[in-house]
Amino acid sequence: MLKRIVFFAMFAFAPIVHAVPPSTESIDALLAATKAERNVDTMLANLEPVMRQSMATATKGQPLSPGQMRALDAVRAQIVQAVREEMAWDKMHPIYVQIYQETFTQEEIDGLIAFYRSPAGVAFVEKMPVIMQKSMSIMQSRMAPMMERMRAAAKQAVDESKAAAPAK
């Protein structure tokens, strides 16, 4: 009976035992195949115009003095610089390695590398920036109506809470 239990346990837990964490070298190969560094650099390069557009949307219809404009520009520049520093590849790379090591097995990383080095994988990687750009454009167009709905809901909640408040 004990032999059967040991035999069963060996087969039941074999996949766990063989789930070798991926090596840093293989993760680096995957990150290179997916052009992860280029994607981070592109995202950081696009940050300034995205922030400029977001601030323009946020202040839409509000006249701003030259001093207010300078203050907004200074805040935007500080935010962009902070994000660029914190999201730079040299800081992000170790995080990617850790996450991939905690998430994937060596076998899975090897399979991903094979895919991303295949013609379909290369096409996927090359076309992903276009997909992201189109997605961002669509999302930005949807953000304005969504923000307006959120503002209206917040205003309604404030108005209702004022109406429900006991008179003094």
Image (tube, rainbow, N blue to C red):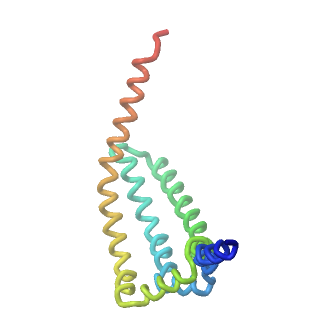
Residue under the image location 39 percent in, 85 percent down: 121
**Where in the figure is residue 112, as x and y percent of width and height?**
47, 82
Give the answer, above or below, for where 152 lies relative to 130.
above
Instruction: Return the residue nearer the eye: 47 or 60.
Output: 47
What is the number of callouts on the image? 0
Residue at the (49%, 78%) spot, across then down: 36
Q: Give the position of the N terminus as an image quadrant.
A: bottom right
Residue at the (33%, 44%) spot, across then down? 61
The reply, left or right, for residue 14 in relation to residue 119 is right
Instruction: Say whether residue 79 is visible.
Output: yes
The residue furthest top is 168
**Residue sitting at x 54%, y 87%:** 29
> Could one spot residue 31 in this view of the protein?
no
Residue toward you, 78 or 141: 141
Q: Position of residue 109 (x, y in %)?
A: 53, 82
- Tell me if residue 152 comes above or below residue 7 in the rendering: above
Q: Where is residue 104 in the image (x, y as percent from the top left)?
A: 55, 75
Closer to us: 36 or 70: 36
157 versus 97 height, above or below: above
Q: Where is residue 15 in the image (x, y as percent from the top left)?
A: 58, 77
Extreme-front residue of the structure: 1
Front residue (pair 78, 69): 78
